[in-house]
Amino acid sequence: NERQRRFPRILGHEAAGVVESVGEGVEDLAPGDHVVPIFNGECGTCAYCHSSATNLCGTYRVDAFKSTMVSDDGTRFSVVNTSGDTVPVYHFLNTSTFAEYTVLDAACAVKINPAAPLQKMCLLSCGISTGVGAAWNTANVSKGSTVAIFGLGAVGLAVGEGARIRG
């Protein structure tokens, strides 16, 4: 698959940060806003976004091989190689968070309370939402349920916490 071969690439999909600047036409985010990047953004206009049955947007659906911006199929990162040529550096999961700065489509940034500690909020974008969501929405854990968790990384621990909260 040619899209798998696009490197270099900035990996990472869990983070929290402060908006440094916004592009033309962005109205719901402003410099200084605290945000959590999400790889499942929502365009707000497709049939999936208007459905009460799903939040898996047709435009921003997870595609681990997508290496460019959804908005224009371009990349915002580049590097000068040893020959002096500027070459693209590709995106990952609409977020590319293993960097001091990243560039996101506005649909992939969710505002959070500025008083919330960023070092804890970064867990919301994948680990906690995936684990708690699995316990509540997929397994529908309720009081008295028996739960087996195989693997206690961030997601597994969040499954346990989701089950504990449910009783």
Image: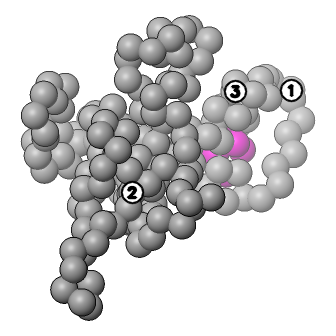
Residue nearest the viewer, comparing 42 with 128:
42
Q: CA distance from mark 3 to mark 1?
A: 14 Å
Residue sticking out furthest to the bottom? 82
Residue 160 in magenta stretch: yes
Neighbor class of circle 3 (other Cα within 10 Å; few <14, some 14-19, many 20+) is some
Q: Residue at x 53, y 57 (%)?
A: 3
Determine which quarter of the picture holds residue 87.
bottom left
Q: Is residue 22 left or right of residue 111?
A: left
Q: Residue 120, can we see it? A: no
Between disc 1 and disc 2, the foreground one is: 2
Residue 54 in percent (x, y) is at 59, 18
Q: Which residues are magenta?
A: 157-162
Determine which quarter of the picture holds residue 150.
bottom right
Q: Secondary structure at mark 1?
A: loop
Residue nearest the viewer, comparing 155 with 92:
92
Q: Is residue 19 left or right of residue 82?
A: left
Q: Residue at x 85, y 39 (%)?
A: 147
Q: Tell me whether circle 2 and circle 3 mark residues in contact (CB < 8 Å).
A: no
Q: CA distance from mark 2 to mark 3?
A: 31 Å
Task: Answer with mark 3 or mark 1, whichever residue precedes in sequence.
Answer: 3
Q: Residue at x 67, y 60 (%)?
A: 153
Task: Answer with mark 1 or mark 2, whichever residue precedes in sequence.
Answer: 2
- Give the numbered dot on residue 113: none
Question: Circle 2 is placed at which residue position?
Answer: 91
- Give the numbered dot on residue 136: 3
Amino acid type at circle 3 is Trp
Amino acid type at circle 2 is His
Question: Circle 1 is placed at which residue position?
Answer: 144
Between disc 3 and disc 1, the foreground one is: 3
Q: Overall secondary structure of the magenta stretch? A: helix
Task: Answer with mark 2 or mark 3, whichever residue precedes in sequence.
Answer: 2
